[in-house]
Amino acid sequence: GAGVSQTPSNKVTEKGKYVELRCDPISGHTALYWYRQSLGQGPEFLIYFQGTGAADDSGLPNDRFFAVRPEGSVSTLKIQRTERGDSAVYLCASSLAVNNEQFFGPGTRLTVL
Amino acid sequence: EDQVTQSPEALRLQEGESSSLNCSYTVSGLRGLFWYRQDPGKGPEFLFTLYSAGEEKEKERLKATLTKKESFLHITAPKPEDSATYLCAVQASGATNKLIFGTGTLLAVQP
């Protein structure tokens, strides 16, 4: 079966612009996670959805970051007024509700010029 | 504060030279400890989950073990294709399902 997919694979934008990153989880997985990974670092948690609702958004760095999952499947991470410090790889993962293993997608590399 | 520390940062082995990677953790209560492998330009690939001290899991040349303070990833007779970054993460009891990752160990196996 298909794994977690993320689009686009690469996104280059200018400082101050708005970007949307998309995640398609594994079919049947009810939990979805967003992480951010900077060069040489481990992934850093951003937000977690159980179904359509955000169960934990404590990792979002500020109010420029927002994520939605309106139908409990696909999720979109939205970043307003991008800054150069937002440059990183944004990873999405999904898991079954009763299974702790999180399966990651390939990531979206965001570069803010 | 929940924290994960991995050592060494980088490790270079000859093919067939066995070694171990360390993951030390501080967490209010451990729900699970996870090992992932990450190749350049790709997302982390799930390897193992360990839940309690004394637990061990194996997959091909890899074996993961867990104590109350740390986990080891033992690599037996490694091959060049084992070269990757190995990430350790913990999930705390009572928290949501978020993972707290270490910075990883970059393993290079030379033929």
Image (cartoon, coloured by chain):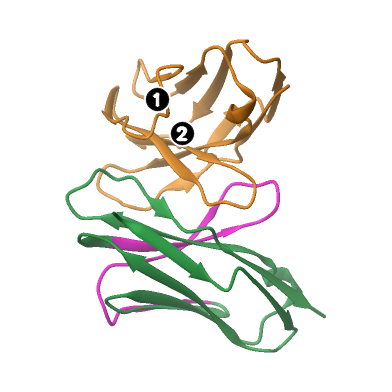
Chain colours: A orange, B green
Q: Which residue is mark 2?
A: A25
Q: Nearer the viewer, residue B82 or A61?
A: A61
Residue B92 falls in image quadrant: bottom left
Residue hosting label 1? A73
In reply to whether residue A25 is colored magenta, the answer given is: no
Label 1 resides on the chain identified as: A
Q: Classify mark 2: helix, strand or loop.
A: loop
Tags 2 and 1 touching, CB below 8 Å: yes
In the image as oriented, which residue stretches furthest toward the right? B111
Mark 2 Cα shell of 10 Å, populated few (<14), some (14-19), many (≥20): many
x and y percentages locating residue A44 in the rendered image? 46, 43
Residue at the spot 57% in from the left edge and 51% down from the top edge:
A41
Query: Label 1's element?
Result: loop
Q: Residue at x 70, y 15 (%)?
A: A14
Q: Residue at x 45, y 78 (%)?
A: B72
Q: Is residue B88 left or right of residue A109?
A: left
Which of the 4 quarters of the picture holds residue A87?
top right
Residue extending farthest to the left is B94
Query: Looking at the picture, how far across and down is residue A49, in whole percent?
Result: 32, 30
Mark 1 or mark 2, which is nearer the start of the sequence?
A: 2
Asked if residue A95 is positioned above or below residue B25 in the image, the reply reads: above
Magenta residues?
B32-59
Main SS, magenta residues: strand
Q: Reply yes or no: does residue B41 show up in magenta.
A: yes
Regarding residue A28, the answer to whether it shows in the image is no
Subunit of label 2:
A
As shown in the figure, which amino acid type bears the numbered disc 2? Pro
Q: CA distance from mark 2 to mark 1?
A: 7 Å
- Residue A44's tag is none
Towards the viewer: A27 or B14: B14
In this rendering, does residue B3 appear at all?
yes
